[in-house]
Amino acid sequence: TLDMTDTFGDGWNGAAWAWADQTGATQKTGTLTGGYEGTSSFCVWAENGPCYTFIVNAGYYPSEITWTITSDNDPNDTFDGGAPYTQVVCGGTSPPTQLPTMTQMPTMTPMPT
């Protein structure tokens, strides 16, 4: 989970973050469009590589920007920073091997009259 903050309360003013896999392919991007705080989520799949890169560009007022990433698997596994920032993050889990299956709906039986 990515927790974003802006000390002035007007969003990140042109700054944005990106989450890229080991090939450099962007997996997700975002920004804090307004206000003091916001959150976003993204996944770390081992099949996309053991390492990802998290990037935050400066925008117009980088001194107002802070953020924290917390692992959903371990709330003690965090890292944080400001803007601009680039960090390689290694780790991840394998994605599910199969999607959940749908169960059949029960058959309706008419009530006797």
Image (cartoon, helix red, strand yellow):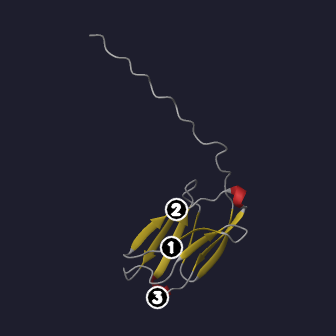
- Three-letter amino acid code at the position of disc 1: Trp
Mark 3 → mark 1, Cα distance in angstroms: 14 Å
- Residue beneath the point at 58% across and 53% down: 73
| Of the pair 31 and 82, the residue shown nearer to us | 31
Q: Nearer the viewer, mark 3 or mark 1?
A: 3
Pointers 2 and 1 in contact (CB under 8 A)?
no
According to the picture, the residue beneath numbered tag 1 turns out to be 67
Mark 2 → mark 3, Cα distance in angstroms: 24 Å
- Three-letter amino acid code at the position of disc 2: Ser
Q: Earlier in the sequence, mark 2 or mark 1?
A: 2
- Residue beneath the point at 65% across and 74% down: 87
Task: Name above or below for residue 4 compared with residue 107.
Answer: below
Q: Secondary structure at mark 2?
A: loop
The residue sitting at the left extreme is 113
Quarter of the image with the C terminus is top left
Q: Earlier in the sequence, mark 3 or mark 1?
A: 3
Q: Nearer the viewer, mark 2 or mark 1?
A: 2
- Residue beneath the point at 55% across and 56% down: 72
Horizontal and vertical percent position of residue 26: 63, 70
Say few, some or many: other residues with alpha carbon within 10 Å of mark 1 (under 14 / 14 to 19 / 20 or more).
Answer: some
According to the picture, the residue beneath numbered tag 2 turns out to be 41
- Three-letter amino acid code at the position of disc 3: Tyr
Q: Which mark is residue 61?
A: 3
Mark 2 → mark 1, Cα distance in angstroms: 13 Å
Q: Secondary structure at mark 1?
A: strand
Q: Where is residue 45, by image quadrant?
A: bottom right
Q: Which mark is residue 26?
A: none
Say few, some or many: other residues with alpha carbon within 10 Å of mark 2 (under 14 / 14 to 19 / 20 or more).
Answer: few
Pointers 2 and 3 in contact (CB under 8 A)?
no
- Residue beneath the point at 38% across and 17% down: 109
Task: Name above or below for residue 32 compared with residue 110.
Answer: below
